[in-house]
Image (spheres, rainbow, N blue to C red):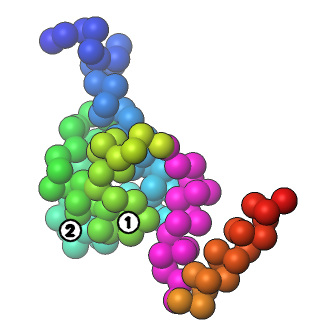
Amino acid sequence: MNRAANTPQGRSEPSRSIGQRLRAARHARGISLQALSDLTGGRLSKSRISNYEQGIRRLSVEAAKVLAEALGNVSAAYLLCVDDGETKSPDEMQLLQRYRAADADGKAEIMGLAEQRCAG
């Protein structure tokens, strides 16, 4: 094992970062590990998701797609840390989730409020 590439606990830095993103996305939705497992249709167990969050188990592309679909507030690319590299806070992720869930009028209202606040 290449110790330089791993944390003292034997977890690789990419797996830890992926786990942190997954946990933040789940917390932004306000759901438990069991609820997320249920949202995957049982394809991923509570313990497997927990292992991903802790960086114990490496997240596959297929599992990232399942989790992203179940969460609805992030992409698989974001979970795998292959997006633009910009980390979103839980508040930003919650706002994005609410924007995506809004109807056309709601989206227009959200954008209008953002424009007003950013205009100074």
Please name which of the two marks, 1 or 2, marks the residue nearer to the observer: 1
Characterize the magenta stretch by its predominant secondary structure. Answer: helix
Label 2 residue SS: loop
The amino acid pointed to by label 2 is Gly
* Label 1–label 2 contact, CB within 8 A: no
- Which residue is labeled 2 in the image? 42
Real-space Cα distance between discs 1 and 2? Answer: 14 Å
Label 1 residue SS: helix
Residue at position x 19%, y 55% in the image: 63
Residue closest to the eye, 9 or 60: 60
Determine the image quadrant of residue 71. bottom left
Determine whether 56 is above or below 73 in the image.
Answer: above
**Residue 94 on the magenta span:** yes
Q: Which residues are magenta?
A: 87-103
As drawn, the label of residue 118 is: none
Residue at position x 70%, y 77% in the image: 112
Determine whether 116 is above or below 83 in the image.
Answer: below
Determine whether 6 is above or below 45 in the image.
Answer: above
The amino acid pointed to by label 1 is Leu
As drawn, the label of residue 71 is: 1
- Observer able to see residue 19: no
Q: In the image, residue 51 lies at what x, y percent? A: 28, 42
Residue at position x 39%, y 44% in the image: 84
Where does the N terminus fall, quadrant-wise? top left
Q: In the image, residue 90 lies at what x, y percent? A: 56, 53
- Observer able to see residue 98: yes
Mark 2 neighbour density, 10 Å: few (under 14) some (14–19) many (20 or more): few
